[in-house]
Image (tube, rainbow, N blue to C red):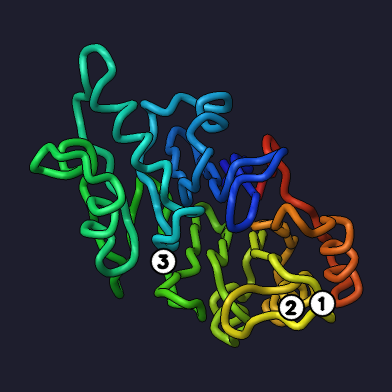
């Protein structure tokens, strides 16, 4: 079995007309892991899989376009007839528990602990069934981590949100698929230490010698064809634009 990636939401910074914000389903055998649950993503996730059959949620960071629908997922789990028979592990950056409880503010005393078992990223790998997960801090305005998932000699690396930094390429070395954000356009006066352009994503992919690059976190006010062209100018490997419902075998 190989890892399988399904794009649930790929819009950057806020939901767009054609996509929810960041959310990605990774499957291996019978294991289902969701990377990020940005605003609007739970609806799309329900169309593509059983939301009550997830083994873990991994949050790259706690900006709303990457985590807001964990609150909706809490409601869907805690108020459905019959309730839930187990908690779902949620992995994230330091302070993830307090941050998510602050966003939810359900007024029920226990916050979101009734449905989720929160864990912070650490030095030790995370094992979810046959999938091994590691993370590394990237360069963003708040703490944000790239995530690497490995199983059966295949590897997928998701950048989360990051500005250009050498850590991304070193973390992604040899991966079969790089799911890298590409929020900005080459040639624009872009803010530093915030996001990548298509060209910068491609440069990191080339340095890491990845098998395939998937460009995501596509901001609605930019033409995705321009983002793709920027990436193709910087790397001759396979470049793919993320879109809701796209399925890829890693």
Q: Quadrant of the N terminus?
A: top right
Specify the label residue 136 is tagged with.
Answer: none
Which residue lies under the disc numbered 3? 134
Horizontal side, residue 219 vs residue 193: left or right: right
Residue 226 location (% of width, % of height):
88, 63
1 and 2 marks in contact (CB < 8 Å): yes
User: What residue is drawn where x is 19% and y is 24%?
Assistant: 85
Which is more toward the observer, 227 or 54?
A: 227
Q: Secondary structure at mark 2?
A: helix
Residue 34 location (% of width, % of height):
46, 44
User: What residue is drawn where x is 79% and y is 54%?
Assistant: 240
Q: Secondary structure at mark 1?
A: loop
Which residue lies under the disc numbered 1? 186
3 and 2 marks in contact (CB < 8 Å): no
Horizontal side, residue 50 vs residue 98: left or right: right
Which is more toward the observer, 245 or 40?
A: 40
Which residue lies under the disc numbered 2? 200
């Amino acid at each position: 079995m190989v890892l399988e990636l399904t794009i649930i939401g790929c819009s950057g910074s806020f939901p767009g007309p054609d996509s929810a914000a960041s959310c990605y389903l990774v499957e291996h055998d019978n294991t289902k892991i969701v990377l990020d649950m940005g605003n609007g993503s739970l609806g799309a996730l329900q169309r593509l899989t059983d939301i009550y059959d997830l083994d873990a949620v991994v949050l790259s960071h706690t900006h709303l376009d990457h985590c807001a629908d964990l609150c909706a997922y809490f409601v869907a789990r805690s108020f459905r007839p019959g309730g839930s028979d187990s908690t779902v592990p949620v992995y994230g950056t330091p302070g993830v528990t307090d941050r998510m409880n602050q966003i939810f503010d359900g007024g029920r005393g226990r916050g979101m602990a009734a449905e989720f078992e929160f864990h912070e990223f650490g030095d030790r790998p995370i094992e979810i069934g046959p999938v091994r997960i590691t993370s590394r801090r990237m360069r963003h305005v708040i703490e944000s981590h790239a995530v690497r998932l490995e199983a059966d000699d295949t590897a997928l690396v998701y950048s989360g949100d990051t500005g250009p930094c050498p850590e991304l390429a070193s973390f992604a070395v040899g991966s079969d698929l790089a799911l890298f954000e590409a929020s900005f356009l080459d040639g624009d006066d872009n803010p530093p230490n915030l996001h990548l352009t298509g060209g910068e994503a491609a440069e990191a992919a080339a340095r890491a010698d990845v098998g395939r690059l998937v460009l995501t976190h596509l901001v609605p006010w930019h033409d995705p064809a321009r983002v793709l062209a920027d990436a193709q100018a910087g790397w001759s490997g396979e470049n793919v634009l993320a879109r809701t419902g796209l399925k890829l075998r890693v």
